[in-house]
Amino acid sequence: MQLRSYGRIPGATEAFSQSLLSWAHLETLRCEELTDDALVYLAALPCLKELTFSVLHNTSFRRLRSRIARKPFQRIEDIWFTVVDMDQATQFVSEMGISPSSIRVWSRYNTCSSRAEDLFDAVAKHASPVLKSLIVSSTDESELASHPPSSSFTVRANTLSISSFRPIFKCSHLTSLHVHVACALTLNDQDLIELGRSLPFLKDLDLNTGVGSQTPSNVTFYGFFWLLTLCPHLYHIGISFNAEDLSSVDPTSDVLPEKRPPMPPPHKTVLLFVGESRIQHPQKVAEILDVVFPRLEFVECWDSEPQIPFDAERSEVAAVHSRRWRVVESQIRRRRRDRKRFETRWAKVRKEMKKHFREDQDGDSGSQSDESESENDEALTDSSTSEEE
């Protein structure tokens, strides 16, 4: 069942929630707000596997849990929330004790890194054995626009670091991790290496590239290449890094071999999100990325409307680095076109070479056959001459 936009109609939430109470075989439900009675009913459904819903600002999952006799949402596999305050998602995971394979949280007020950390702790405690996908992002959906956060909402902290993510490392089979919280993100090369070693099955990783940042990234090509090596299946990649520092990957630099990262295997990435990555030499960066991403076509950077707005200084910085990343993108596309032209020409040459080789073989076999016939004739002549003698 999928139903949207009914929240704008007076009385529709109550009417739809009431109708749910007569459906006993729901496996998938995608909707908006629900009454407490409907949520209690859904929690006991034996076959519900996927649930998407919006949470009102005054919903208390602690109160709802007291009304549910058995273990709630026993067969749930995918749970997607749209919430006013991220604490509501944390409360749901903790109180219901759910362990789905996919959790997605869209929060209207997601400016508090401490709330994100609380959610990570709850997820790691209850869902770590089977969790494959975790997405924490923001939303501006109109149905939540008129709902304020609770009166107790405060920004307790506004910085995410590697320690914020460590609880998630218990979810060692995670393949998708998106975190977009409107706060500062402080990671360095060693942090990224730790993340790669802890989550080696990642295919999809995006860390705050869409919301903007407050400080330049401390991740360089060293940590970036280590991440790509430790997570060889990464396809969707979104991370801000310092592309101005090429020392660890520039063969002409004086960096010792042990200070250089391993060369990652080729990745199939087509679209690379670099967030607010700063760059100095676009031609060199294009050469480096082209080796690791032979299929790369698009580079997304410096979102023009980030969740953390630009001031005048950052707007100027954004304009400079955006132009340089556009050069990288055009250079990589040109290299791909040149490769395709070369491969097309080489395929044609190989075809011609095979054709000539077959003709030469046929000619050689014909000549050998004539020679053998003439040798046989000579042998017969010699034989008859010897008999006559």
Image (cartoon, rainbow, N blue to C red):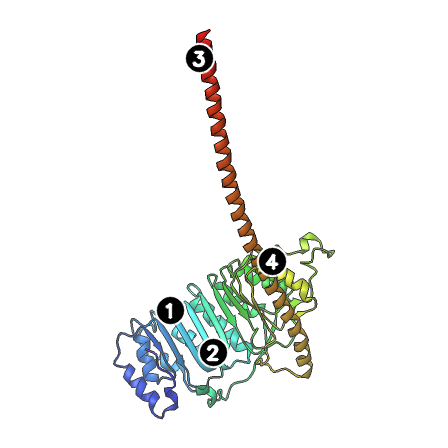
Mark 2 = which residue? 106
Quarter occupied by the N terminus? bottom left
Query: Dot 3 lies on which element?
Result: helix
Location of mark 1 (residue): 77
Is 135 rendered above or below residue 61?
above
Q: Position of residue 75 (x, y in %)?
A: 33, 69
Mark 2 → mark 1, Cα distance in angstroms: 18 Å
Q: Is residue 293 above or below residue 37?
A: above
Earlier-in-chain disc, 4 versus 2 = 2
Q: Which residue is mark 4?
A: 291
Q: Secondary structure at mark 4?
A: helix
Disc 2 crowd rating (10 Å Cα; few below 14, some 14-19, many 20+) is: many
Q: Which numbered disc, 1 or 4, marks the residue that appears first in the sequence?
A: 1
Residue 175: mark in rendering: none
Q: Residue furthest right?
A: 254
Whole-percent x, y for residue 252 in the image: 72, 56
Cβ atoms under marks 4 and 2 closer than 8 Å:
no
**Residue 246: in sight, yes or no?**
yes
For mark 2, give the secondary structure.
strand
Q: CA distance from mark 3 to mark 2?
A: 101 Å
Could you classify mark 1 by the number of other residues whose Cα lies within 10 Å: few (under 14), some (14-19), or many (20 or more)?
some
Ranked by sequence position, the earlier of labels 3 and 4 is: 4
